Structures are given as C-alpha cells and as structure tokens.
Amino acid sequence: MSLDGPNPAVNDVIRGFGSFNKAIRAINVFKEVGIAVSLSYTVIPDNAYYVTDMVKLTERLGVPVLTFIRVQEFGRARENGLSLSDELARMVINDLMRIRTNVKLVLNGFRFSLSDLYEVYGKSRERLNALKIINYSTCPPAGRSRFVIDPDGSVYGCELLMSKEFYEGNALRDDLRAIWRDGFRSFRDRRYVEIKPCSTCPMADLCNAGCPARAFTAFGSVNLPDPYCPIVKELINKYR
C-alpha cells in the first residue's frame, strides 16, 4: 500500500483529499482477512521531514515492512520538478539510521547518497560472496527476468522506459515466447565494462553502471552511466 505521509495533512496534499483514511481502512481490511501488507513511501521534498513519523505510524498499524523510495525524475515527477537533492536524501538516511524499530526498513534509490558508499559496497560484496550469490545487479532485472505489459498489450523491459525506443511487441498479437527469446537487447547487451567511468570503478560489478532508465533520460542512451553516481556528477560539473 502506498502512503506518502504519516497523516492526512501530509499525504493528502500529494495523493488527493481523503486518500489517507481510505488507505488506512484498506490496510486494516487486508490484515483482518489475513493478507500480508507492506507500506511504500515515495520521498519528495515535501514529505522528506516526516520519515520518522511514518515509521511510528507503521508500528501502530502492525505492518512489518516499510519501503522508502527516492522519487525518480520520470513522468509527472519530472514535469513538476519533483527531485530530491543529495542533501535531503542523506538527511532521510541519517534520520532512519537513528530509529530503533522492529519494522523492516527498505531504502530504494538512495545508495548514491550514502556518505560511506564504497564501504557499504565492500560489505555488500562480502555478504553476497558468503551467500554464494552471483550475477547480482542493483538494477531490477529489466528484460532479463521480467518485463512489463501496458494496458494496450505493448511489451517493454522496464516500466520507466515505456516508449517507442524500447517497444518489444504486443502481448495480444505476438508470441510472448518469441519476444522473450529475441527481444530486450537494450538491457541484455548493456555492459558496464564498456561504459566510462564505470569500466575502471572498483564497485562496477555490483553497480552495473546504475539505472539504465536514468541514463537514458539524462543522456539519451542506456549505454551511459547513471547520472546519480557521485563520480559521474563530478565529471559533469568539471566539464560544464
């Protein structure tokens, strides 16, 4: 369930009048009939200061998992200039790090704002090796183990890249097996070892050049690095 504020005053400005109370009623109904519920909170400048209150609300509701998603600059978020600065993103991380809670907190899209990014990546690599997990990617496996279908049947590899450049066919007319076998080359052929500066980055095997959708939106190609990466930001600022 999506909630973008810990109370109606914050949430309903973003999601519409009355949406907070409707979401709370739905959560309680799901719990009553035994359906597992988790919460999702998209962090934008207007609600970034309420993340600790959101954790407390999640505790009161008895929901075990709360995901904080950094707003992505696509669609209406991009049209309305809803981006989250690195300073605000770090504030959110720090606020959540200070909380003691039994709720499982998940951060989505915040890794490039970590002050100890390389240390975290190092620990992540150790953990993945211990679990014998190979071919890990920080990007959702778009076009590799999943795809998305638009309401009209159009097939794409990623919900953030549903445009003609990434159209793979139509589920109502085409053979999905053939689409899966032969399509999604934009994602499957993306190689971080061929992308600079990722090719020389010590954490490239985990990061995999970051998000191809953000790269395409910022630079016009999925075969370029994630603009959120601090190294890429440095290069952009250097050559401006």
Image: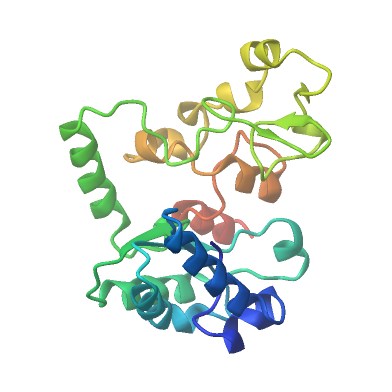
| Nearer to the camera, 71 or 170 | 170
Q: Quadrant of residue 155?
A: top right
Q: Residue at x 55, y 42 (%)?
A: 225
Q: Quadrant of residue 160?
A: top right
Residue 198 position, x and y percent, is 45, 38
Q: Is residue 140 above or below residue 111?
A: above
For the point 40% across and 79% down, which residue is it?
57
Q: Residue 145, image x and y in percent?
A: 51, 26
Determine whether, in the image, residue 29 is placed left or right of residue 161. Answer: left
Quadrant location of the C terminus? bottom right
Q: Give the vertical position of 233 relative to 61 (above or below).
A: above
Pinpoint residue 162: horizontal percent, then vertical percent.
74, 40
- Could one spot residue 156 in this view of the protein? yes
> Is residue 221 toward the left or the right of residue 138 in the image?
right
Q: Pick whichever, 181 or 34, lies toward us.
A: 34
Say which quarter of the image contains residue 92: bottom left
Residue sitting nearer the eye, 86 or 57: 57
- Relative vertical location of residue 80 with respect to residue 53 in this rendering, above or below: above
